[in-house]
Image: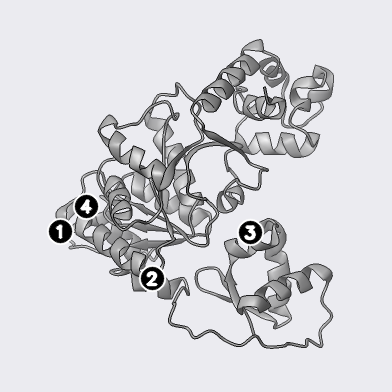
Amino acid sequence: MDQNLLYQIGITLVKGIGNITARQIIETLGDVSLLFKEKPAVLERIPCISKKTVTEIHRPEVLKRAEEEIEFISKNRINALYIYDESYPARLKDCVDAPVMLYYKGNAPLNVEKVISIVGTRNATAYGKEMVDKLISDWSKTYPDTLIISGLAYGIDIYSHKAALREKMPTAGVLAHGLDRIYPPVHRNIAVQMIENGGLLTDFISLTNPDRQNFVKRNRIVAGLSDCTIVVESAKKGGALITANIADSYHRDVFAVPGKATDAYSQGCNTLIKSKRAALVTEAEDIFKEMCWMKDKKPQTPVQRSFLIDLSADEQMVVDMLAKTEEMQLNILCIELNISISKLAPLLFELEMKGIVRCLPGGIYRLI
């Protein structure tokens, strides 16, 4: 049995240790296995660990349950993604409350160049379905390799997955339960197709029920995985608006499809637009423009730049990467440089102050 994986899963099963605390503990100890090997007196000296938590850590049931989960994921060929693995979604990793463990069954890579989430009401209208079809159909003509994220729920979610499959685009569903079931069960056939051209993702272990509170937790992953979130239809309240708010808190772009002022399931979208928490979108090109993803730009001949300003080694590394394409989206830049947003952001700020790069909408950075 993989001992590293045992401890990686184990920390997520300790009562009193959430995702933020777990990352603090791992960074403090340097090795997650030490959480289960160190003496209680040592663990109690860590600020975020209480005596009660130490007792929970040493409960034999914790690692026993982790062993059971390893057997489950091994039997069902599920990929366990630890937050410090290269295969872990880079966009999500930069969210402060990113899950320490993810469980993924599928074949679509999660770190592709463009990832979008489409969310909305479970009571989708004909208008909402039509807009989903239009957006994804148009999108597939320009960026067919974009990964479409949604939650496999009734309404806009499942129509987004179906539209992506129809256009042969990769699509992944984020679940509010373990991978030992599909909820709602009626979407099982679609889920099977998604595994062939996309995947199913969750941070919940097997035997986890799809309880109400889990769907809110699921929404943060939908938002964190994506470059932007598109709300197609939503009432005044609902999970889609929660996802939009979370995406905004992660500094990701939010878009909303407008509707009639009298339509119940357009009120949420109209409010997002009216309050300037989302940009209005009626076609895929609106998003391309806002995100600076226009493909009609002619390739430019690389320009040899000679800066008279002294750059640090890290700043020069960023400039060299941007010089290859003239501009690059923030998340992709992090992936290419293999550094976190927290480390990259101050470098970009310094380069902006020195007049070397410019920040554009959609998190795009361009060499001046």
Q: Nearer the viewer, mark 3 or mark 1?
A: 3
Amino acid type at mark 2: Thr
Q: Nearer the viewer, mark 3 or mark 4?
A: 3
Q: How far apart are marks 3 and 4 (CA)?
A: 37 Å
Name the quadrant of the N terminus: top right
**Crowd rating for badge 4 (residues with CA inside 10 Å; few <14, some 14–19, many 20+):** many
Q: Name the residue under label 3.
A: 335
Amino acid type at mark 4: Tyr
Dots 3, 1 in contact, CB < 8 A: no
Q: Name the residue under label 1.
A: 262
Residue 14 is at least partly visible in this image: yes
Name the residue nearer the viewer: 274 or 365. 365
Q: Regarding mark 3 in the picture, which secondary structure is present there? A: helix
Residue 280 is at least partly visible in this image: no
Q: Mark 2 points at which residue?
A: 142
Q: Which residue lies furthest to the top in this view?
A: 60
Q: Name the residue under label 4.
A: 265
**Crowd rating for badge 2 (residues with CA inside 10 Å; few <14, some 14–19, many 20+):** some
Closer to the chain start, of discs 3 and 4, is: 4
Dots 3, 4 in contact, CB < 8 A: no
Dots 2, 3 in contact, CB < 8 A: no
Closer to the chain start, of discs 2 and 3, is: 2
